[in-house]
Image (cartoon, grey):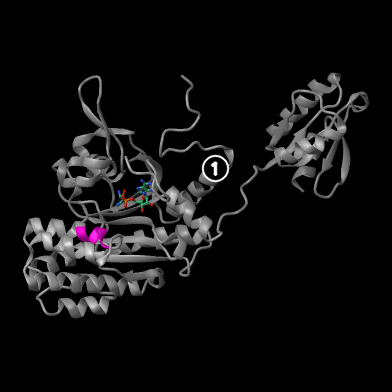
């Protein structure tokens, strides 16, 4: 049997060119998180399935999780998301920590999905979460971190928008205006979550199956058509909803640096069960790439599954696949086709090998990125090889130079060429740096 060279379905090999892009995105993620005082953490690749069963929701557990029994008959899963892990970790130490606790991580996650644009089976996800922030400040800050990241690539309100909703309000609407019981509410959530991906007839059919009253169904369909906070207020004012807290949040948002991105969207409810308050998704505005780059929200009760007192948390996950699609769609990636080394160190005669390799090594001690060639290279072949290695300088050392104890260094951009003594390492460094 011939083995396939392709990676497992829905996963990727990262050849240097792709790894450079990923590293570039990761460095921007860490920078954005650091700017807001978030500390890095990490957790295990495997967790007990029970951890996800507690709060993540049916879809993740039934359809998407990679699970197996380990050799000790423990039922474990490759992490499909990071939030249960971070909640478990925070539950261990929150009592001794000053609040708020601000953490970030960039784990790889696996979900058994049908691979398609923007959806793979393995992806890396930038996670930022804040625990124990007072009032609505955590929510605002989390949105600012996400926006900061996208802005750091040069994106603005023409490129993306933040669609938000509040599950507390949705719960209220479903129970008081639509008169749905708990089971119906759960099913309505799933319909809302799917509503953008299916047509009107399909929505109607799904709603009919829930068995609402005629008025309830009308109210539900009306709810789906709301387009602004004002619409929402008018819609809810017919009931006794307490909109004060959400209103206060909207006022804070409107006065914050992210206000230009914010849009109310009744169809954002998020597929994960642990969210209890504000929920949001960051959407690409480009018509060719209308999809979520990032999703998150507030969860008040996740620590209770570990028998801890409630500690409110809010956070987001932003995937590397969707981020790269977004950046490419809007032309926001720099040219990372080639790496950036300083000098290609070559020798033209066998006898010059040791001197050439030794100079390369001394240059590295001075912080110069030196790429060597282990075999002699003819003078006229050096330039072609140098181009592939994407260096700015090349050096030559043949018998003639060896005798004089010199080395020839050429700047490939300016074509300037200079001779140095073998002992002039610092001068060579300065020439390369200048
Ligand atoms: P999520 O909406 O499942 O949330 O995922 C967040 C983001 O991860 C998505 O918007 C997308 O960019 C990316 N993503 C998710 N699944 C895939 C996939 N199969 N392929 C490629 N990218 C994907 C969560 O996971 C929450 N735990 C986020 C969170 C953190 N909430 C609070 N804190």
The image shows residue 371 at horizontal and vertical percentages of 71, 33
Is 406 on the left or on the right of 50, as rendered? right
Q: Nearer the viewer, residue 30 or 391?
A: 391
The residue shown at (29%, 68%) is 265
- In what element is the residue under mark 1? helix
Vertical relation: 228 (above or below) 421? below
Main SS, magenta residues: helix
Mark 1 within 8 Å of ligand 1, using the beta carbon: no
Q: As drawn, is 260 to the left or to the right of 203? A: right
| Residue 192 located within the stretch drawn in magenta | yes
Give whichever of 279, 421 is nearer the camera.
279
**Vertical placement of 261 versus 148: above or below?**
below
Q: Position of residue 349 (x, y in %)?
A: 86, 22
Does 37 appear in magenta? no
How packed mark 1 is, by other alpha carbons closer than 10 Å (few <14, some 14-19, many 20 or more), is some
Query: Could one spot residue 56 in this view of the protein?
Result: no
- Which residue position is annotated with label 1? 18
Q: Which residues are magenta?
A: 191-195
**Image quadrant where residue 386 sits:** top right
């Amino acid at each position: 049997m011939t083995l396939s060279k392709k990676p497992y379905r829905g996963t990727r090999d990262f050849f240097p060119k792709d790894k450079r892009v990923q590293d570039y995105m990761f460095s921007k993620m860490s920078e954005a998180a650091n700017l807001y005082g978030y500390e890095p953490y990490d957790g295990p690749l495997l967790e007990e399935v029970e951890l996800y069963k507690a709060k993540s929701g049916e879809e993740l557990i039934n359809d998407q999780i990679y699970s197996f029994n380990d050799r000790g008959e423990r039922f474990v899963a490759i992490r499909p998301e990071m939030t249960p892990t971070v909640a478990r970790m925070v539950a261990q130490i929150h009592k001794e920590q000053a609040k708020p606790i601000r953490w970030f991580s960039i784990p790889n996650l696996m979900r058994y999905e049908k691979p398609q644009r923007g959806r793979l089976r393995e992806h890396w996800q930038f996670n930022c979460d804040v625990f124990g922030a007072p009032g609505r400040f955590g929510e605002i800050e989390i949105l600012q971190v996400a926006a900061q990241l996208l802005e750091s690539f040069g994106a603005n309100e023409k490129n993306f928008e933040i669609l938000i909703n509040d599950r507390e309000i949705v719960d209220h609407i479903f129970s008081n205006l639509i008169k749905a019981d708990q089971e119906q509410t759960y099913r309505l959530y799933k319909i809302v979550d799917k509503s953008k991906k299916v047509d009107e007839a399909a929505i109607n059919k799904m709603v009919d199956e829930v068995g609402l009253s005629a008025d309830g169904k009308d109210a539900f369909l009306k709810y789906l058509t709301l387009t602004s906070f004002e619409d929402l207020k008018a819609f809810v004012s017919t009931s006794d909803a307490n909109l004060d807290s959400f209103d206060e949040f909207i006022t804070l948002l409107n006065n914050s640096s992210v206000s230009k991105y914010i849009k109310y969207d009744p169809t954002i409810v998020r597929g994960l069960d642990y969210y209890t308050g504000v929920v949001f998704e960051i959407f690409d505005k480009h018509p060719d790439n209308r999809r979520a780059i990032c999703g998150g929200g507030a969860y008040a009760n996740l620590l209770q599954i570990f028998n801890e007192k409630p500690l409110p948390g809010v956070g987001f996950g932003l995937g590397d696949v969707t981020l790269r699609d977004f950046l490419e769609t809007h032309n926001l990636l720099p040219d990372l086709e080639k790496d950036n080394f300083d000098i290609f160190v070559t020798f033209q005669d066998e006898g010059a090998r040791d001197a050439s390799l030794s100079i390369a090594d001394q240059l590295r001690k001075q912080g110069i990125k030196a790429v060597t060639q282990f075999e002699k290279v003819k003078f006229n072949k050096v330039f072609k090889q140098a181009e592939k290695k994407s260096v700015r300088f090349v050096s030559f050392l043949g018998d003639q130079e060896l005798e004089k104890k010199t080395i020839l260094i050429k700047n490939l951009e300016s074509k300037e060429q200079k001779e140095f003594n073998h002992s002039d390492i610092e001068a060579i460094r300065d020439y390369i740096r200048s």
